[in-house]
Amino acid sequence: MRFWIFAAALALIAGCQGHGGTVAADSAQPPLRNPVGPVPGPDVALPVPQNPYANNKVAINNGRQWFKRYNCDGCHGGHGGGGMGPSLRDPDWIYGSSDPDLFADIAEGRAHGMPAWGTKLPADQVWQIVAYIKSMNTPNEAEPPTP
C-alpha cells in the first residue's frame, strides 16, 4: 500500500515539474461573453425618487414633530446632535446623505440599532422627517437648538 502512495506522489511531482511550475496560457478558462440566465434589473435606469417636501417649511415643522413623536430624539438627541445613535448634524454619513438615502435609512433601518420604520409609517411622514433632517444647520430648521 505504501508503495502505491509513494508512486502516486512521485508521478504528481514529476507532472508538476514538466510545466516548470506554471500553467500554460491556453489551458485557462476563457471569459464568459454572454451571461447565463436572466440579467437582473431594468434595461434603463429608473428615476431616483425626490423628496416632495424638500424646503417646505410646513413639512419641515411636521417632520420635527414626527421626529419627536416617534422618539428619534431618544437615540439621535433632541436636535439630532447624537446620543446613542449617530449625529444627524455631521457632514459625514455612512450610507449617504441624499434624500433617497435618508428615506432608505428610515424605511429599511440599518445595522447596529436603527429600526426599520417603513412598515409602520406612511411615506409622507418619512419624507417629512427627511426634510427636517436635511434642514438641520440651515435657516429653514424648525426649532433650532440654542447655542
Image (cartoon, rainbow, N blue to C red):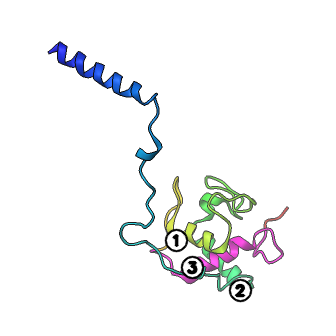
Q: Which of marks 3 and 2 is nearer the N terminus?
A: 3
Q: From the top left corner, tell me how far across and down residue 65 is, in percent.
A: 64, 76
Q: Nearer the viewer, residue 2 or 76?
A: 2
Residue 40 against residue 22 in the figure, above or below = below
Residue 66 against residue 11 in the figure, above or below = below
Q: Nearer the viewer, residue 37 or 27?
A: 27
Please give the name of the residue rendered at 45% of the width and 40% of the height, measured from the top-left corner: 24
Q: Mark 3 points at which residue?
A: 45
Q: Quadrant of residue 56?
A: bottom right
**Mark 3 to mark 2 CA distance (whole Å):** 32 Å
Of badges 3 and 1, the one in the foreground is 3
**Kind of residue indicated by mark 1:** Ala
Residue 146 is left or right of residue 97, and the answer is: right
Q: Mark 1 points at which residue?
A: 107
Q: Which of marks 2 and 1 is nearer the N terminus?
A: 2
Of badges 2 and 1, the one in the foreground is 1
**Kind of residue indicated by mark 3:** Ala
**Mark 3 to mark 1 CA distance (whole Å):** 22 Å
Stretch in magenta = 119-144
Q: From the top left corner, tell me how far across and down residue 64 is, in percent.
A: 67, 75
Please give the name of the residue rendered at 61% of the width and 52% of the height, measured from the top-left corner: 84
Please give the name of the residue rendered at 41% of the width and 66% of the height, measured from the top-left corner: 35
Q: How crowded is mark 1: few (under 14 residues within 10 Å), some or many (20 or more)?
A: many
Q: Earlier in the sequence, mark 3 or mark 1?
A: 3
Quarter of the image where the N terminus is located:
top left
Please give the name of the residue rendered at 57% of the width and 79% of the height, measured from the top-left corner: 45
Q: What element carries label 3?
A: loop
